[in-house]
Image: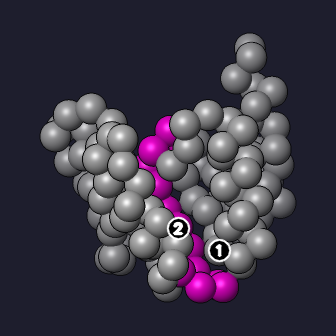
Amino acid sequence: MTYGYVRANSTETDKENQLKCLKEKGEFQIFIDDKDCDDEFQRLLTIAKRGDTLIAESINKIAGNMVELQDMAEDLSFMGITLITIRESIDTSTPEGKLKVLMSDHFTHF
């Protein structure tokens, strides 16, 4: 099963743009959190199972920094859940996607 995740960091427009971006990728259940809350993300993690996919518009909607991204990607991988980010074209079901996550911290310094 595929799940979408939206974290509205700033404005209602931000949330609407993320929803539009996710809906262009297909029909699936979308979990939405406000800026400083991750209750829905935690609920998503309790529902998702091995073989499922989590799609977010961007890295910064699921992780506050690159260390968090790497930790989250590792945790999801251990759970058998694929992470896809649309903006950065990360897909952890592929070797290239896994490499992007590992290298992402290094690229942010340039």
Disc 2 element: strand
Please indicate, yes or no, whether residue 2 appears anywhere in the rendered image. Answer: yes
Q: Going by the image, does 74 lie left or right of 35? A: right
The magenta span reads: 48-61
> Where 39 falls versus 63 (above or below)?
below
| Residue under the image location 72 percent in, 64 percent down | 75
Specify the label residue 54 is tagged with: 2
* 57 is within the stretch colored magenta: yes
In the rendered view, does 65 fall on the left or right side of 1?
Answer: right
Q: Position of residue 61 (x, y in %)?
A: 45, 44
> Could you tell me which residue is drawn at 77 percent across and 72 percent down?
78
Residue to which mark 1 is pinned: 81
The relative height of residue 17 versus residue 19 in the rendered view (above or below) is above
Q: Which residue: 70% across, 23% down?
A: 108
**Residue 95 figure quarter:** bottom right
- Determine if residue 86 is in view: no
Q: Nearer the viewer, residue 43 or 27?
A: 43
Q: Are marks 2 and 1 in contact (CB under 8 Å)?
A: yes
Indicate whether 63 appears above or below 85.
above
Dot 1 amino acid type:
Ile
Amino acid, disc 2: Leu
Left or right of 66 in this view: 4: left
Which residue corresponds to the image point at 33% horizontal and 40% vertical from the top-left? Answer: 35
The C terminus, quarter of image: top right
